[in-house]
């Protein structure tokens, strides 16, 4: 089942920041630890190591979303990790992260946008709804 991005939103610390324009660089990887014994093992042996997850979201920023964006900037300055939710029409991704970078953009007669990059500090939970 594919997850639809229609009407997707980004929530930070229980406040909806805005409707998603896009998600990029959503990666999660696990390090590997080589446990091979030199000269004794025919094949290298590995065990799983620590995980690392990051993502960047771009949101349309409406005037009503102003306070949520301000909270993100405050958390960026303090380095505090907060709960996040990427809410799609038929599923969610959630966890806890801290902001590593942000950017604001606007074009004349265009929508204002907010770009937020995050370092995830917990497991990411994926849930789906519907069939």
Image (cartoon, helix red, strand yellow):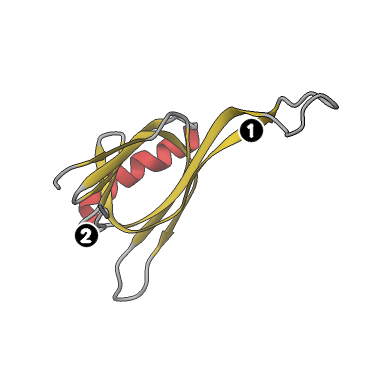
Provide residue 60's location: percent of width, then percent of height: 30, 59
Q: Which residue does the numbered mark 2 point to in the structure image?
A: 6
Estimate how packed mark 2 is, as few (under 14), some (14 to 19) or many (20 or more) residues with alpha carbons within 10 Å: few
Q: Using the image, determine if residue 122 lies above or below residue 102.
A: above
Query: Which mark is on residue 111?
Result: none
Q: Which residue does the numbered mark 1 point to in the structure image?
A: 32
Provide residue 56's location: percent of width, then percent of height: 44, 51
Provide residue 91's location: percent of width, then percent of height: 23, 45
Query: Taking the image as drawn, is residue 56 in sight?
Result: yes
Lower position in the chain sequence, tag 1 or tag 2: 2
- What secondary structure is marked by label 1? strand
Query: Taking the image as drawn, is residue 84 in sight?
Result: no
In-front residue for pair 57/53: 53
Q: Which residue is drawn at the image coordinates 34% and 75% (left, top)?
A: 108
Q: Which residue is drawn at the image coordinates 29% and 67% (left, top)?
A: 111
- What secondary structure is marked by label 2? loop
């Amino acid at each position: 089942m594919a997850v639809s991005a229609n009407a997707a939103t980004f929530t930070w610390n229980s406040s909806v920041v805005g409707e998603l324009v896009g998600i990029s660089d959503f990666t999660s990887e696990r390090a590997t630890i080589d446990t091979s014994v030199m000269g004794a093992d025919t094949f290298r042996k590995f065990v799983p190591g620590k995980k690392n997850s990051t993502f960047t979201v771009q949101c349309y920023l409406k005037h009503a979303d102003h306070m949520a964006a301000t909270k993100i900037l405050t958390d960026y300055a303090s380095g505090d990790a907060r709960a996040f939710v990427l809410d799609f029409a038929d599923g969610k991704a959630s966890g806890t992260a801290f902001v590593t970078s942000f950017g604001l953009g606007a074009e004349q007669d265009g929508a204002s946008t907010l770009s937020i990059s995050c370092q995830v500090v917990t497991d990411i939970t994926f849930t789906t709804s519907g069939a």
